[in-house]
Image (cartoon, rainbow, N blue to C red):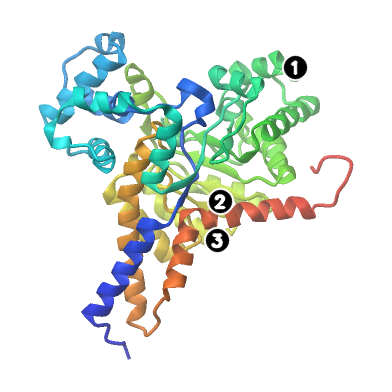
């Protein structure tokens, strides 16, 4: 017998969920932002917002500029071209355009004036330290995880010099060149840095790769390791990527007590003339990820996939493997339509053991719109789920709603990471490294 849920009760539930979702602080577990100590690497302000690579790609669909002409422009000139094309000559309907306006509006700026010079004047008054705190306050983001690569020359020197960490900024060790360009990029660089590796994956080389991973894990206090993988990555497979994962990366993660995050489905440089905006999407083979996860029950895996078509099979895979945690609506899936579709699919198939969103922000101010938009969608879906439950007679208390939302906004991720740390701590304290 269903319990008649009055419209008033449904509305009260929805209002409670909305209030909780809009006010619960978020741990943003994957971004391209930087601790302000990294100086110019931390992008912020109206011109960086406008030349974000999502808007560059959309701008090229409207203006007749050649690629060469556009890339020869200053950042301000590029921002002017994008502003005129996407905000003045056409209405800013796309999610990336809307995001700029949401950010400006939440910062208290009057967007209907369409006055870019006035906007620039407002941003010019800020300094990065105060503005970082302001953006995090407006966005309700309490912690930001960076993407940190030793292979990024600008970033590496800051780590090597050392600096006082802003404890709001966590670090993740990004290792794409190690796995995807071992012979061409990583092996020579590791040798430059004093690790005696050879292109062949000898025992000595593997041991030195693990020493490199351990050094950088310690240096940045990595919360997880991370790689973005092409659609055709296969496991098992006779490829360097799979072999380095198996012999070096995953044993290191077990020993260090860290999850391994994989982001499959990027087709890099589909249009190289667009530079960072030129990457596309490819469908990955979920079998590969099921095989990898099944073969490593003592590792914790985080996955966010780029192709919409992979979302359902990954949800089913997450039902099979408790050491798989799905996160975010990444990149091209970060649109209202797909965030709603993916959040429904996940809540209905794997409940609250998921992290429905990360911002992937490259420009500090973007956390304001990326979280404003996603909170509202996640809140709508969650409210509907509770309303469905209410029809059975079961209703969440306000404390249970708060607990569930905290889980979705970083708590479930931290519990998931905690399992790998606990396993590493239990591991018998042996002299030699764990295989
Ligand atoms: O590889 C990644 O982490 C992606 O997020 C890329 O950095 C991509 O350029 C991006 O910014 N997507 O939103
Ligand atoms: Zn990213």
Q: Quick one: 31 or 297, which is closer to the camera?
A: 31
In front: mark 1 or mark 3? 1
Q: Residue at x 38, y 39 (%)?
A: 135
Tag shown at residue 290: 2
Q: Earlier in the sequence, mark 3 or mark 2?
A: 2
Secondary structure state at the residue bearing disc 3 = helix
Q: Quick one: 275 or 19, which is closer to the camera?
A: 19
| Circle 1 residue | 194
Q: Residue at x 25, y 21 (%)?
A: 79
Q: Residue furthest front?
A: 125
Q: Earlier in the sequence, mark 2 or mark 1?
A: 1
How much space separates mark 1 and mark 3, taking CA atoms? Answer: 42 Å
Secondary structure state at the residue bearing disc 1 = loop
Q: Which quadrant: the C terminus?
A: top right
Residue 103 at what x, y percent from top left? Answer: 28, 39
Q: Which quadrant: the N terminus?
A: bottom left
Q: Residues within 10 Å of mark 2 (few under 14, many from 20)?
A: some
Q: Determine whether 332 is above or below 373 in the image.
A: above
| Circle 3 residue | 320
Q: Residue furthest left?
A: 89
Do the residues under discs 3 and 2 have CB atoms within 8 angstroms? yes
Residue 351 seen in the current view? no
Horizontal relation, residue 431 to residue 420: left or right = right
Residue 69 seen in the current view? yes
Q: Residue at x 43, y 28 (%)?
A: 128
Do the residues under discs 2 and 1 have CB atoms within 8 angstroms? no
Tag shown at residue 69: none
How much space separates mark 3 and mark 2, taking CA atoms? Answer: 9 Å
Classify the position of ligand 1 by quadrant: top left, top right, bottom left or bottom right.
Answer: top left
């Amino acid at each position: 017998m269903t319990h008649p849920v009055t419209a008033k009760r449904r509305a009260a539930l929805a209002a409670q969920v909305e209030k909780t979702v809009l006010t619960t602080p978020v741990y943003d577990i994957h971004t391209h932002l930087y601790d302000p100590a990294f100086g110019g690497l931390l992008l912020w302000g109206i011109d960086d917002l406008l030349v974000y690579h999502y808007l560059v790609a959309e701008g090229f669909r409207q203006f007749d500029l050649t690629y060469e002409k556009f890339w020869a422009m200053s950042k301000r000139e590029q921002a002017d071209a994008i502003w005129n094309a996407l905000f003045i000559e056409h209405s800013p309907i796309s999610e990336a355009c809307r995001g700029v306006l949401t950010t400006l509006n939440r910062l208290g700026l009057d967007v209907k004036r369409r006055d870019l010079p006035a906007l620039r004047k407002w941003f010019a008054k800020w300094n990065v330290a105060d503005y970082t705190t302001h953006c995090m306050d407006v966005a309700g983001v309490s912690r930001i995880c960076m993407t940190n690569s030793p292979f990024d020359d600008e970033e590496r020197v800051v780590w090597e010099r050392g600096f006082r960490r802003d404890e709001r900024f966590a670090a993740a060790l990004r290792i794409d060149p190690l796995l995807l360009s071992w012979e061409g990029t990583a092996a020579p660089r590791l040798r430059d840095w004093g690790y005696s590796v050879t292109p062949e994956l000898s025992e000595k080389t593997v041991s030195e790769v693990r020493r490199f991973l351990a050094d950088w894990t310690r240096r940045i206090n990595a919360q997880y390791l991370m790689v973005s993988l092409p659609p055709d990555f296969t496991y098992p497979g006779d490829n360097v990527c799979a072999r380095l994962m198996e012999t070096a990366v995953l044993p290191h993660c077990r020993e260090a007590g860290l999850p391994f995050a994989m982001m499959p489905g990027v087709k890099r440089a589909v249009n190289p003339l667009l530079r960072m905006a030129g990457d596309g999407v490819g469908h990955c083979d979920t079998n590969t990820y099921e095989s990898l996860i099944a073969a490593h029950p003592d590792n914790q895996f985080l996955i966010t996939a780029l192709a919409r078509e992979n979302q359902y099979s990954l949800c089913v895979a997450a039902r099979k493997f408790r050491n798989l945690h799905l996160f975010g609506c990444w990149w091209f899936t970060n649109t209202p339509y797909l965030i709603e579709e993916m959040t429904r699919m996940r809540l209905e198939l794997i409940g609250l053991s998921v992290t429905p969103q990360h911002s992937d922000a490259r420009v500090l101010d973007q956390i304001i719109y990326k979280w404003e938009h996603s909170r509202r969608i996640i809140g709508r879906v969650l409210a509907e789920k509770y309303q469905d439950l209410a029809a059975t007679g079961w209703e969440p208390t306000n404390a249970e709603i708060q607990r569930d939302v905290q889980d979705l906004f970083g708590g479930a991720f931290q519990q998931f990471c905690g399992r790998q740390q606990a396993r590493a701590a239990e591991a018998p304290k042996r002299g030699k490294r764990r295989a």
